[in-house]
Structures are given as C-alpha cells and as structure tokens.
Image (cartoon, grey):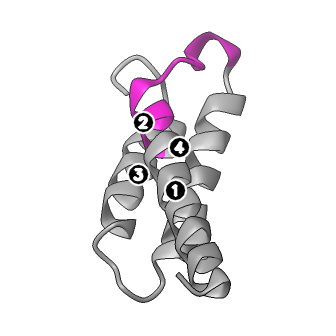
Amino acid sequence: MRDRPGRRAWLGPIALLLAVLCWFMPLGGVAVAVAAIACASASILTDRQYRLDWTAVAGASIGAGQLFFTVFLMAMEAAGH
C-alpha cells in the first residue's frame, strides 16, 4: 500500500477487510465476498508496476474461498446430505 500512489492504494486493504468480514456475516456474506474480489481485481489489474499487492491477493483468495464454501454448502443441501 505504501508504494502505490493515490486512492488505488486502498483497494488491496479494503479487499482484505471485506474478505475477512464476509466470513462473519450470516446474511450478505456472498455479496461482500464478491465486493472483495472486485476490489482485489481492480487493485491487481491497475498500475502494472504494483500488481503484486499482497493484501489484494489475500483478499481475492479469502473472498473466493467464501464463495466456494457457499456453493459447496448449497450443493450439499441440494443433494440432501
């Protein structure tokens, strides 16, 4: 964050914060996970020299984990397990 100039410096930390929060939200967790992935993607896809922002990568990974877990639980429920 400290190396990236401007407002885009906050995209990675916001993505990480949203990704962690989505695991603690019983309602709306999927929407928050999608927002975390969107912020992380915006951070990673902008400013070529700053693409490897660890907070953005962590935020995208944690948010994707939440989405995968939700889809897994929905599939298990649909299968009757």
Between 76 and 54, the residue placed more toward the observer is 76
> Which numbered tag is attached to residue 4?
none
> Which numbered tag is attached to residue 36?
1
* 58 versus 69 height, above or below: above
Disc number lying in front (1 or 3):
1
First along the sequence among labels 1 and 2: 1
Residue with the most extreme front position: 81
Tag 3: residue type? Ile
First along the sequence among labels 1 and 3: 3
Q: Which residue is mark 4?
A: 60
Q: Which residue is mark 2?
A: 58
| Mark 1 vs mark 2, CA separation in Å | 10 Å
| Mark 2 vs mark 4, CA separation in Å | 5 Å
Q: Residues within 10 Å of mark 4 (few under 14, many from 20)?
A: many
Tag 2: residue type? Ala
Residue drawn at x 36%, y 85% is: 26
How far across and how far down the image is residue 31, in percent? 56, 75
Residue span colored magenta? 48-59
- Splitting the image into 4 quarters, where does residue 54 fall? top left
Circles 2 and 4, Cβ within 8 Å, touching? The answer is yes
- Splitting the image into 4 quarters, where does residue 27 fall? bottom left
How far across and how far down the image is residue 75, in percent? 64, 74
Between 4 and 31, the residue placed more toward the observer is 31
Q: Quadrant of the N terminus?
A: top left
Asked if residue 58 lies left or right of residue 41, the reply is left
Q: Which residue is mark 3?
A: 14
Q: Residues within 10 Å of mark 2 (few under 14, many from 20)?
A: many
Q: Residues within 10 Å of mark 3 (few under 14, many from 20)?
A: some
| Mark 4 vs mark 3, CA separation in Å | 11 Å
Residue drawn at x 43%, y 47% is: 62
